[in-house]
Amino acid sequence: MKVYNTLSRKKEEFVPLEEGKVKMYVCGPTVYNLIHIGNARPMIVFDTVRRYLEYKGYDVNFVSNFTDVDDKIIKKAMEEGVSAQEISKRYIAECKKDMAAMNVEPATAHPLATEEIDGMLDMISTLIEKGYAYPAADGTVYFRTRKFQGYGKLSHKNLDDLQAGHREIKVSGEEKEDPLDFVLWKPKKEGEPYWESPWCQGRPGWHIECSVMSKKYLGEEIDIHAGGEDLIFPHHENEIAQSEACNGKAFAKYWLHNGFLNIDNKKMSKSLGNFFTVREISEKYDLQVLRFFMLGAHYRSPLNFSAELMESAKSGLERIRNGAQNLKHLSENAKEERMSGQEQEIWEGSQAFVTKFEAAMDDDFNTADAISAIFELVKYSNTNVGGDSSKELIGNLRQRLCQLCGILGIIAEGKEEILDGEIEKLIAERQAARKEKNFARADEIRGILLEQGIILEDTREGVKWKRA
């Protein structure tokens, strides 16, 4: 199996640090609002990478954090007149609902930055002791970028070029020894959440958070560190500098980054009005369609999102589901027979599509070609199976199709549709929970219905619902 390593800029044979085990860290979202479809891409992509590694027999320790203290969270909290903790807690819960609806498996651990402050204070103290960091007079602690010899090895940026023209990592502040030094700890501002430290009452810089959470949950050296390509610089570059300066070891062996997501060939932004949350997409499409769309391109390629491409993804997914449904129907009506000699050949012939699927995934997780192999398996099954086929052959092909789809997180056999009566019953239970101020249960019921593709709308006339 080969993976493209951003560090070396080439495909490398995947060999984990410990045989049979993979330690994988993926940078998670900053939780100040509902997640958008740009957030969804790394979630879907690296969930699929994890699933394939598990299919290959690896024991995967998969850690993905939530950044729950940040300027945007604090700003949102001040706008609403609530605590930053209330904002982050609310949107972590909403994020988990969207992840479940996209069939993204929960991580082995989902650490929160605010629960790992002690580890951050320890790492910063070690960096100061080793001469890689220094406190300024106002209590800000900076990392000495130039002291770390390998700085720039991931992004392939040159420090002198950065000094001369680039302003990407320059932070305002006259107390820095060098304009390229970055913040590890910063003093609180009026009304902001803060923690006690040896340097000042304040909070951590963003980069130190991931270094500490990765170390705590996976160890000083990990196999895979992943995220969007927008994180390569400065976030991941700074993580490498901090972690390797502190621990004296190579931080991550393989760096994987997904490409950007554009909307109608334009960069997604609120100002252009082309900013979509996953929740908004779920009102128009089953989120399996979004997942299928995301996997239809190679993860490192830029991906363009449009209504036409989503409709195309919807049609493609329906082709696969119709194939699975056809096999299910045939299986239910087939005679309890073993495969004949000719059917044995048909069954053995289907192995070619598994081989093609695995070859695609072994080549830097090429999900587009893997989906192509699934389409070919559907066509092969439709051509070679009929009403007179044995239950064993039909069942085997059906299981094979569902397994390959499952590796991609695609549910080939859609969930049984929830009945109207069941929906009304759950809505009534939700209304009762709200009257009793049991908002946790009310939210849980909304989430259950959302997973079934049922959208609720609270109006003056009562609760209205529709199928997505």
Image: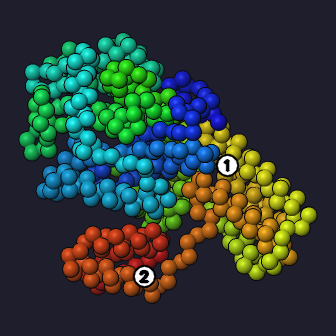
Whether pointer 2 and pointer 1 mark residues with C-beta atoms closer than 8 Å, the reply is: no
At horizontal 78% and vertical 52% (from top left) the residue drawn is 351
At horizontal 27% and vertical 83% (from top left) the residue drawn is 432
Question: Which label is found at residue 403?
Answer: none
At horizontal 26% and vertical 56% (from top left) the residue drawn is 89
> Farthest right residue?
341
Is 281 positioned to the left or the right of 203 in the image?
A: right
Assign a secondary structure to mark 1.
helix
Going by the numbered disc 1, the residue's amino acid type is Ala
Q: Position of residue 416 (x, y in %)?
A: 56, 76
Q: Residues within 10 Å of mark 1 (few under 14, many from 20)?
A: many
Compared to residue 2, the image places residue 381 above or below, namely below
At horizontal 26% and vertical 28% (from top left) the residue drawn is 123
Assign a secondary structure to mark 2.
helix
Choose between 75 and 130: the one closer to the eye. Answer: 130
What is the quadrant of residue 411 in the picture? bottom right
**Which residue does the numbered mark 1 point to in the structure image?**
370
Q: Residues within 10 Å of mark 2 (few under 14, many from 20)?
A: some
Question: Which label is found at residue 423?
Answer: 2
Q: Position of residue 370 (x, y in %)?
A: 67, 49
Q: Position of residue 193 (x, y in %)?
A: 14, 44
One can see residue 45 in this view: no
Is 32 positioned to the left or the right of 194 in the image?
A: right
Q: Position of residue 102 (x, y in %)?
A: 48, 59
Cα distance, mark 2 to mark 1? 36 Å
Is 445 positioned to the left or the right of 81 in the image?
A: right
> Farthest bottom residue?
421
N-term-proximal mark, 2 vs 1:
1
Going by the numbered disc 2, the residue's amino acid type is Ile
Compared to residue 154, the image places residue 96 above or below, namely below
> Farthest left residue?
190
What is the quadrant of residue 233 in the picture? top left
